[in-house]
Image (cartoon, rainbow, N blue to C red):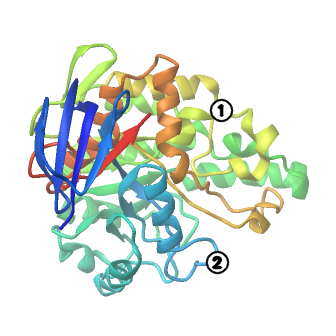
Amino acid sequence: MQTILIKNADLVNEGVIRPSDVLIRNGRIDRIDSSISADADVLIDAQGKALMPGMLDCHVHFREPGLTHKGDMISESRAAAAGGVTSVMEMPNTSPPAITNERLEEKYALAAQKMAVNYSFYLGASLNNIDQVKVVNPKTVCGVKVYMGSSTGNMLVDRVSTLEELFRECPINLAAHCEDASIIQKNEAYYREKFGDQTPFSAHPIIRSEEACYQSSKGAVELARKYGARLHILHVSTARELELFDDEVPHISSPRENECYIEHDAPVRKITAEACVHYMHFDQSAYDVLGARAKCNPAIKTAADREAIIRGLITDRLDTIGTDHAPHTKEEKQGTYWSAPSGMPVIQSAVPSILEHYHSGLLSLELIASKMAHIPARIFNIQDRGFVREGYWADLVLVD
């Protein structure tokens, strides 16, 4: 039954920055006005600070159940909250993988006891669980995760007939990891023969190449258009992939080049795509400095690809900003190229990392709020979150 009054904030919401006071009552936004006088349990003077919707991260790996030596729902959700991420959508490649609705229910029961932020979970697609996909609950499950041609676990879906049925029958959003396994395997064979255990980490973007990403993403887009599926392509890592989204009708209004925002309750397009913070921050030179710590799938690629991804957000070819937060232990990351696992723990630094692009003059605060909160809320049909509106949950981040 707590009330919080935030005074003198620069409210960043729905394409506008305006001086505002915000009154929060019982966890929801009770009132937004230029000046509010009210008794409150907590008074926050936000003079000189930006008040934004908290990040809605559509792409995290919290490692529970089964992989909790890397992280768990408690540790990773606290890291999310500390970094300004107020809602997460967690992936199914845990142990055991969440490829049945029964296992999803088990994860929801765990999360109810442990999560420090709002949450939903993806159901994982496999070669033989289309019956589970058809009966998934759209009110609680954010999407179905499909590994299009590549997977580090046992959820690889590489049979054409299964993919066609999945894209035809899935009743909710499909979220796709797109890398072509056959291309990757050929590149791996070359480097194993030439370098063996001495394969450098700098080979990662060559092994998991631009071509592997493009061909798989192209196949996913073609299937989505053929069957009218709702498709969200995860962690776009190449400039070339942006071509696939060029002819989609934008759902963003862009009055000026660097100030795009979602219209009030605008419809969303069916094929959308994600930029992740590490592809916006690093390029392939990171492998020489960070080694295994920069190893993730898809691979971080060239500086030109990094610049294209940022540009893709500005021009609306890319719709959301996520993290693909995927923690491992330091010991695991000390292995050779072939043994060190892929994945980076980035959720606590995600919002500060995004804001670096504001300080460099590339992204406006309005665009950042749109890509990390407004548009994810619309794509995944999240009720009463993702915007700073009266009656909505007060999932807010205050930025100095």
Q: Is residue 342 left or right of residue 103?
A: right
Residue 114, horizontal then vertical, whole percent: 41, 78
The kind of secondary structure element at disc 1 is loop
Residue 19, horizontal then vertical, whole percent: 22, 26
> Considering depth in this image, is 1 or 68 the residue closer to the camera?
1
Q: Residue at x 9, y 46 (%)?
A: 390
Q: Amino acid at mark 1?
A: Asp
- The image shows a total of numbered marks equal to 2
Residue 320, horizontal then vertical, whole percent: 35, 40
Q: Is residue 241 above or below residue 63?
A: above
Q: Is residue 356 left or right of residue 2?
A: right
Residue 208 seen: yes
Q: CA distance from mark 2 to mark 1?
A: 29 Å
Q: Is residue 205 above or below residue 60?
A: above
Q: Quadrant of residue 383?
A: bottom left
Mark 2, residues whose alpha carbon is within 10 Å: few (<14), some, or many (≥20)? few
Q: Amino acid at mark 2?
A: His
Q: Quadrant of residue 3?
A: bottom left
Q: Residue at x 57, y 48 (%)?
A: 298
Q: Is residue 290 left or right of residue 86?
A: right
Point out the image quarter for the C terminus: top left
Point out the image quarter for the N terminus: bottom left
**Cβ atoms under marks 2 and 1 closer than 8 Å:** no
Q: Is residue 186 left or right of residue 41?
A: right
Q: Residue at x 18, y 31 (%)?
A: 251
Residue pointed to by mark 2 = 69
Residue 326, horizontal then vertical, whole percent: 56, 60
> Considering depth in this image, is 14 or 129 the residue closer to the camera?
14
Residue pointed to by mark 1 = 283
> Considering depth in this image, is 182 or 105 the residue closer to the camera?
105
